[in-house]
Structures are given as structure tokens and as C-alpha cells.
Amino acid sequence: MSQLNSIIASVLSDINEAKAKADLTSSELAKTYAADKVLRYFPVPRINIENLEVEIKYAVNSVEEKPVDNASTRKKINDFIQVFSDETSVAVKKAVENVTKNNELFKEVSSVYPSKEWEASLKEKMADVLVKSFRPNNPSKTKDLALSGLKTAIPDLLPVVKRSSSMAIVPTEKGDFQIMGIDDDGKSEFLIDKKYVSEVDALKDAKALTTSLKSKKVEVTSVKTDEIKKVDIGALKAGNRTFNVLLGAKKFNDPKPKASLEKAIGVKAEFLNQPRKEVPNWLKASKPASANVDPEKFEEDLTLKIATEKVISERLPLLEQGINDIMSKNAITVMNVNVDSESIKNAQPETVSTIKFSLSAQDFTLLDDDQEPIL
């Protein structure tokens, strides 16, 4: 079984080779004739093909479409990827904005994030991943590689919040970190009035405060109201350390801010001291989120990552479809055929066909008596 184009190419190659050998023989004869006193007066024998008809009978074994991966196709793919990256970046930015504006864990960065510069970085990184993921003969594989690559690349552009059941390490608009006290619903109760340059240092203090809460060694020593900043400022004594905390606008004008803060601290202490119930294996599968959660452990909040991955997963089928459309428009039809008599004899009649073509003198380079090309 061979491809029809290979068979035709082979036939044409054989004809050209035969003509070339004939011309070489004529050239040698010309030298012999020129050296002979008698033969020099005779014309040199040579092959002159005026017209050649070729007829090939074949049986079609299979027909397939093959994408053409050339410079033109690559340009179309790259242009499409750029447009796709632009549109997807806009959708991702919208999803990120929705989270940062509505989730209190990100309220300290919502005024500056995500920025236009962030969106430009996202577009560039996304386009780079998609170009590297492109597989010309397998759009589905391209989609899978793109999803995997983007899941790895995009988190570098997302601010990270680490949280436990009662506290969170939150990023600030200047790239610092703060410790936030949160309730059962993840809402902010207070913010420690200190900026940490290092997440590690913030985490160290958050864990120390958690340990003091669990040991019931945290005391609310005072709460004052800042009328200018519209905020209540409290002081928490934890062991030999004191943490100043901002209760925020929601707590402002609370008639008993000290009592409210003491209640929040007490609730946290009680929760941390509750015995952790060991969840059986059969129940873990049905309730993985609540299975044996350590209330003191700080883990990455996945809200932003989930929001971005949702957008990407919803849009990647459009990437696959777009690549499919481009590759199908630049595909060639390849016929695999048999030309031996036995295969043709045994083939179904509807699969047997004949191709005919003619070659004229213009298809060959012929030489005149002076060995000059005849144009």
C-alpha cells in the first residue's frame, strides 16, 4: 500500500532519470562521432520526447485528511492563540476582581489588584504556555497540555492567603502581609495593626497567637475609638506580647466594642479546644472538606485558584475548536492505494480508478546540436 502522490512522483522520477541517462548516452556518442572522420558527418542519435502519455490504474485502500503544519498555518495558529489569550485574560481578570472585591480575605489588595500591568503579564504568560502546548496533529492533546501548563503558570500571578479556622495571613496592596482574625464564615473580625515584610514572620506570629488562644492566655486589655480613622483599636495581650488590632468600620460605633472583641476571642478559644472527632474512612469520601480538619493548621486559601481554573476550563474547548478549524482548512487529502494487479483484481469495483496524464516536450530539458537548451 502506498500513497498515490508517492506513486506518481516515482513514475515522474523514473521518466526523468531515463531521459537523463539517454542524454548522457547521446553526449558520449557525440564525442565519438566528433572524433571519427566518417561519423562526424552523421547526426548524433538522441531521444526527443514530443509527447508521453501515462496511465495508472489503482485501487483505493483508504483516504485520510492530514493537517499541513507549515509557516502559514503556524502564523494563523499563533494569531488565534494571541486573540484567545487576550479574551481569556479579560475573563480571568473579571473573575479575580469579583473574588477580591467580595472576599474579605483579599480586601487589603482589592484597590490595586488586579491591575492593567497584571493583565498584560497574564496575557503574555498565557500565550507562551499555549504556543508551547500546540500539537498540530492533536488539538485534544493541545487542550490537555494547555490546561496543565496554565494551572502551573497562573498561580504565580495570584496573591496567596494562608488561613486556619480562626486566622488568616493576608497580602496587602504593597506586597506586605497582615494577620486577620476571621469568624466561622471567613469574615474579618479584626486585623492586627502590623505589616510583615515576610509571610514567614506573619505565620510565626499567627501560630503563636493561635497557641495562646488555645491556652486561653489571650486577654483584651483595652479598646479605644479613633474618630478620625473611623475605627476601633483594641489591644490583645498574649503571654508576654501585646498585639494592637483594628476592629474596622463594621465594628465602629459598637456600643460595647471591648465586649464584642472578648466574645470573638472566647469563641475562637472554645473552638480550638474542641476535641477533634475522627471521621471514619467511609464518611471522608462523602464529606472530604470536613474530614479531620486541624483547626490550628494554616493552609492556602484556594478561592482565587478555583475561580481562575473555572474560567480556563470553560474556555479551553474554544481553543480546541479554533485550532481544529484552522488545521482542517489547511489539511490535504491523502489516498493510500495499491497498484499491483492482484490487489486491483480483488478490490471492490467502486474503489478502482485510473489516472491519466500527458507530458510534452516542454516538460523536459532538451539540447540542440550545440548542446544548448531548447526553451
Image: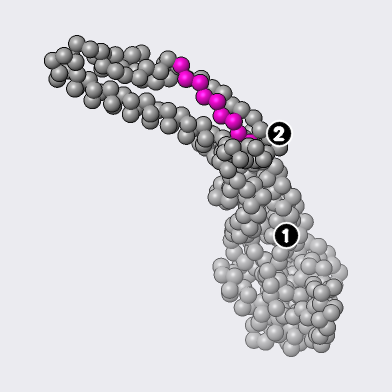
- Where the C terminus falls, by quadrant? top left
Q: Is residue 152 left or right of residue 275?
A: left
Q: Would residue 159 be visible to someone looking at this image?
A: yes
In the displayed orientation, state which residue is furthest to the front.
Answer: 38
Residue beneath disc 1: 306
Q: Give me the residue at 23% from left, 12% from top.
A: 42
Q: Residue at x 48, y 31 (%)?
A: 11
Which one is in front in this view, the residue at disc 2 or the one at disc 1? 2
Residue at which label 2 appears: 349
Label 2: element kind: helix
- Quarter-wise, where is residue 200 in the image? bottom right
Amino acid carrying label 2: it is Pro
**Left or right position of 214 against 155:** right
* Circle 1: residue type: Ile
Q: Secondary structure at mark 1?
A: helix
- Tell which of 257 and 72 is nearer to you: 72
